[in-house]
Amino acid sequence: MRIFVVILLALPFIGSAQTPAKKDSMVWNGAKMVPLSSIPVDTIFFDLSEDLGKQIEPLDTIIAYAVRYSPQLKFEQASVERAEFNTKYTRYLFLNGVTGFFNYTYGDQTNLNSQNADGTVLNNSLGIGYRFGANVTIPLTEVFGRPNRMKQLKAEERMARYKKDEAELHMKRILIDDYFNLIASQKIMKVRQQDVESARLSVEIADVEMRRGKIHPSELSRLKNILTIAESNLELSRRDFMIYYYQLEAEVGVKLSTLRRKK
């Protein structure tokens, strides 16, 4: 029994298990080989009559892909690196109080004129040549506050790493929930498909018996109402399956069709 979820079933998917098919490659749409570009975007390249959990990679592999491609985890990793760079930068901030200079002077540069008791003028002139030196000014906050400041930055580094671990743990919990919800929703969909087929068969039999006068029309109406409820439940299960499928695909960061098990 095949179950069609308003999507195309692709049984022998053409291409590598780890490499998506190219845009113009030929794939199986459940009936014949067609160009990939002609298949709707929401096509699922899996046989939904078989357990989906046996067709895709194990949960550990799916989680590994999600950890590798998750934008949230990349952001948290960048936060860790920022904290580390901030610590390295602060380690040398005391050098702000150290300045050096270098210059060259030439000619007669008088900077002070004074007069002696006898009326002669005394000229004090700067020397000629290269001049260099350094000025050192260290604030007391660098002397007494630097150890605590470095401890604070180290604590911020640990906080960033813990934040990343927390985000990764949260993502894994969501992945685990959606993975098993997807597997369960496929099984529920198959059960409700059987309910629809049973209800439809009952309606067809009741229709024949009513024409023969064996049952009252109200009985046929009751069976049709049961069929309507079964079809409604099937549509809801299809919706749940599609939601969990694409949620899991978005969280992993790659198409689930690229995670097919190698045969």
Image (spheres, helix red, strand yellow):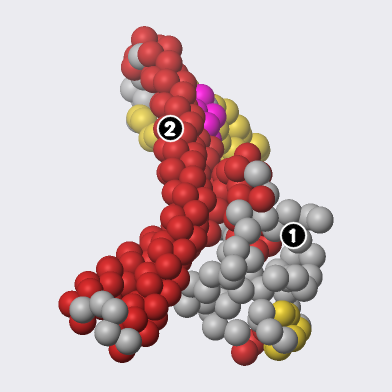
Residue beneath the point at 66% across and 79% down: 30
53 or 221, which lies in front? 221
First of labels 1, 2 by sequence position: 1
Identify the amino acid type marked 2. Glu
Identify the amino acid type marked 1. Gln
Position in image of residue 223 (x %, y %): 28, 72
Report the number of discs: 2
Is 103 positioned to the left or the right of 55 in the image?
A: left
Q: Which residues are magenta?
A: 84-91
Image quarter in which the C terminus is found? bottom right
Position in image of residue 28 (x %, y %): 71, 80
Which residue is labeled 1 in the image? Answer: 18
224 or 80, which lies in front? 224
Is 55 positioned to the left or the right of 144 in the image?
A: right
Vertical comparison of 113 with 10: above or below: above
Residue beneath the point at 53% across and 59% down: 249
Position in image of residue 1 (x %, y %): 59, 68
When asked about the image quadrant of residue 97, the answer is top left
Q: Secondary structure at mark 2?
A: helix
| In front: label 1 or label 2 | 1
- CA separation in Å, label 1 and label 2: 29 Å
Residue beneath the point at 51% across and 51% down: 183
Position in image of residue 83 (x %, y %): 47, 33
For disc 1, the neighbor class at 10 Å (few under 14, some 14 to 19, many from 20) is: some
Vertical comparison of 226 with 62: above or below: below
Which residue is labeled 2 in the image? Answer: 166
